[in-house]
Image (spheres, rainbow, N blue to C red):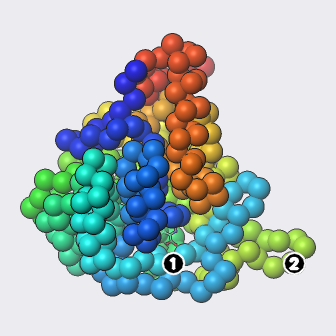
């Protein structure tokens, strides 16, 4: 069986790893990802300076998913350079993926330059879709601003693959506009989707919202968002073909979710809420379930499944 993946020259030992979300902010959390069967170590989105993030409560789970407004709490990019060095020393064989967020073109340029020069980092995911910083709209909903930014990032010398974490799009014209931008550059992957931003969940018992920041609005994940993620994966594959690897994020809790997203066009998947709920054992559980199902169907390579959704 061949269930591995590649982003340019970086080999991933499997197709399932963590999203830049829960349990990947501290060195201890990142080390525990190595101890798991996650196929990479993805770090929490980092900004130029450390950030405390938003006031508590800022994360909550309900039956159908999670809502968060963490507000980009992170230790600042310099710490993640130190963490990458430490992790590579201990665990040389697992790709290290950094997630980068800035508040201006200059911030992004500085961060991409820093990580392009960082030998212990393998892949750069540029987050264009954080929904939770007060007063900062999700970048990838502004196509012109994104286009100018992406042009600048690809002008920076360096040979590490760069991809973009995108927000959910809800209208085909917007997916087409973003695909038009991405086609112009050597984008190696896109991650679809970030949480569905600015949603409200109310607890009918307490008659209160579940989270405090940003007038109680936060990013929605898991069961609620899976059909939105599926549609975004499928639409982008239709528009970009296999030139850009599509990584699915948003709504996985079992093998069936992985299988459906491969059918829709994803080549790799990231686990977020399920990792927060279950801990790092979720990688092995979901991987085993998925391999068992592939075996049952006599598939020996994930390429037999990617973009193979049957027409009606
Ligand atoms: O930290 C967050 O609040 C956060 C980020 Br950076 C993101 O990209 N997506 C999300 O749901 N939360």
Whether residues under marks 2 and 1 lie with C-beta atoms below 8 angstroms apart, the answer is no
Quadrant of the frame with the N terminus: top left
The residue positioned 63% from the left and 83% from the top of the image is: 56
**Label 2 packing within 10 angstroms: few (<14), some (14-19), many (20+):** few
- Describe the element under mark 1 as helix, strand or loop: loop
Q: Nearer the viewer, residue 235 or 122?
A: 122
Q: Residue furthest top?
A: 298
Residue depicted at 39% across the width and 45% down the height: 39
Residue 206 is tagged as 2
- Against 306, residue 117 (above or below) is below
Q: Is mark 1 within 8 Å of ligand 1?
A: yes
Please say if 95 is above or below 199: above
Label 1: which residue?
71
Q: Which mark is residue 98?
A: none
Mark 2: secondary structure:
loop
Q: Residue 96 appears at what percent x and percent y?
A: 30, 56
Q: Residue furthest front?
A: 90
In the picture, the quarter occupied by the C terminus is top right
- What number of labels is visible? 2
How packed is label 1: few (under 14 Cα within 10 Å), some, or many (20 or more)? many
Q: Is residue 129 left or right of residue 219?
A: left
Query: Of label 2 and label 1, which has the lower sequence position?
Result: 1
């Amino acid at each position: 069986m061949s269930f591995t993946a590649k982003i340019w020259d970086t080999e991933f030992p499997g197709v399932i790893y963590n999203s830049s979300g829960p349990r990947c902010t501290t060195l201890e959390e990142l080390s525990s990802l190595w101890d798991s069967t996650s196929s990479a170590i993805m770090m929490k989105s980092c900004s130029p300076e450390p950030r405390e993030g938003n006031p508590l409560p800022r994360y909550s789970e309900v039956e159908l998913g999670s809502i968060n407004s963490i507000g980009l709490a992170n230790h600042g990019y310099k710490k993640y350079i130190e963490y990458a060095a430490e992790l590579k020393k201990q665990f040389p064989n697992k790709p290290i993926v950094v997630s980068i967020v800035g508040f201006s073109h200059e911030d992004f340029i500085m961060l991409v330059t820093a990580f392009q020069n960082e030998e212990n980092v393998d892949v750069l995911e540029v987050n264009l879709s954080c929904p939770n910083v007060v007063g900062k709209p999700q970048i990838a909903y502004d196509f012109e601003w994104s286009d100018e930014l992406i042009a600048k990032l690809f002008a920076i010398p360096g040979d590490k693959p760069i991809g973009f974490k995108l927000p959910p799009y809800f209208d085909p014209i917007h997916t087409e506009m973003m695909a038009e931008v991405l086609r112009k550059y050597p984008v190696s992957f896109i991650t679809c989707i970030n949480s569905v931003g600015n949603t409200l969940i109310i607890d009918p018992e307490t008659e209160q919202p579940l989270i405090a920041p940003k007038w109680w609005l936060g990013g929605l994940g898991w069961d609620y968002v899976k059909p939105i993620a599926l549609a975004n994966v499928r639409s982008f594959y239709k528009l970009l073909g296999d030139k850009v690897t599509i990584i699915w994020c948003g709504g996985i809790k079992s093998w069936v979710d992985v299988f459906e997203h491969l059918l829709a066009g994803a080549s790799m998947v990231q686990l977020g809420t399920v990792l927060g709920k279950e801990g790092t054992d979720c990688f092995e559980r979901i991987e085993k379930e998925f391999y068992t199902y592939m075996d049952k169907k006599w598939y020996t390579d994930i390429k037999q499944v990617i973009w193979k959704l049957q027409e009606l």
